Image (spheres, rainbow, N blue to C red):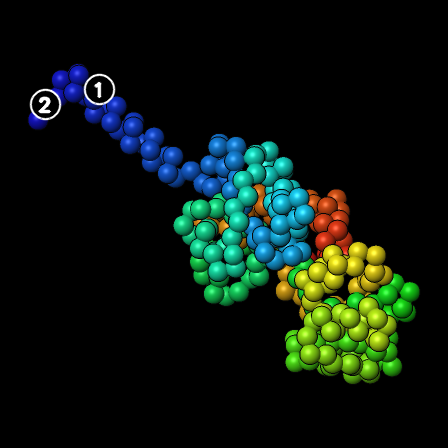
Amino acid sequence: MKMNGKSWAVVAGVCLLVAGIGSANAAGALQRIESSKVIRIAIPTDYAPYGFVGPDMQPAGIDVDTAQLVAQKLGVKLQLVPVTAPTRVAYLQTGKADITISSLGKTPEREKVIDYSIAYAPFYDAVFGRTDLAVKQFADMAGKTVSVTRGSMQDQEITAMAPGAVIRRFEDNNSTIQAFLSGQTQMMAVGTTVVATMKKAHPDVDVTLKAILSNSPCYIGVPKGEPELVAKLNQIIREAKTDGTINRIAMKWLGAPAGNLPE
């Protein structure tokens, strides 16, 4: 079939339109974020100190501070998307969020459906005590008292790692904390979230990190197949580690340094 000049012009126009649509669809997540000048970041609002609603009714915590850092470094507007633990990966898969910063640990199952940045924050079980208590390692705990919640992961960890410590077991986290606060024990073995809750209720208490029992750090979750976005996030995190921002965020919310975060 022969086409006249007008027909060829129509066909060419359609081809250009299709090519344009294809290019738009092929654009990576980083390019779309930079073009729209907005990044949608999924964060928790029910899991202090990583993400929660503060007294001013605004989201706050490690994950929120990190989200603000990412948006600032990208030069785009931040849109926070509240999620729960079961929905934080699903929101990435369904396009409801560009990335998730929600105390997300790395597991083989999750790695099948999403990609990760390098770690941006610690999430650990640890032993805490007064600043002036001369304990820098597990061997220093010999003969010293430690409160812990019976049957918890911290109970198993402190029993194995500090066999010389005098371990006093309690039935729940509140009792474990109260034993430390009242001076029944010199230290307590708890998770970071427990310490954060305690510090919120008792902001003047003297408590500092003595030894880490275990660390399952937090990573930024990214949709599968977005290497440019992953690389950019890694660059932002590395620079924030170098200039001390990551450490300041950890000290602000956990009362302990970020430590050696895995790449």
Identify which residue is drawn at 68% across, 59% down: 122
- Label 1: which secondary element: helix
Percent of width and height locating residue 129: 83, 67
As measured in the structure, the alpha-carbon distance from the residue carrying label 2 to the one carrying label 1 is 13 Å
Q: In the picture provided, is 115 more to the left or to the right than 52? A: left
Q: In the picture provided, is 206 more to the left or to the right than 56? A: right
In the rendered image, which quarter contains the C terminus?
Answer: bottom right
Identify which residue is drawn at 72% across, 59% down: 196
Front-most of 203 and 134? 203
Disc 1 crowd, CA 10 A, few/some/many (<14, 14-19, 20+): few
Front-most of 1 and 14? 14
Q: Is residue 212 above or below residue 255?
A: below
Q: Is residue 208 above or below residue 138?
A: above
Q: Quarter-wise, where is residue 2 in the image?
A: top left
Percent of width and height locating residue 5: 17, 16
- Label 2: which secondary element: loop
Identify which residue is drawn at 52% across, 56% down: 84
Residue position for label 1? 9
Is residue 179 at least partly visible in the picture? yes
Percent of width and height locating residue 43: 56, 50
Q: Is residue 55 above or below residue 108?
A: above
Viewer-side label of 2, 1: 1
**Disc nearer the start of the sequence (2/1):** 2
Q: In the picture provided, is 82 more to the left or to the right than 260? A: left
Residue position for label 2? 2
Q: Is residue 187 above or below residue 85?
A: below
Identify which residue is drawn at 91% across, 65% down: 132
Q: Amino acid at mark 2?
A: Lys
Q: Are marks 2 and 1 in contact (CB under 8 Å)?
A: no
Q: Amino acid at mark 1?
A: Ala
Q: Which label number is shown at residue 164?
A: none
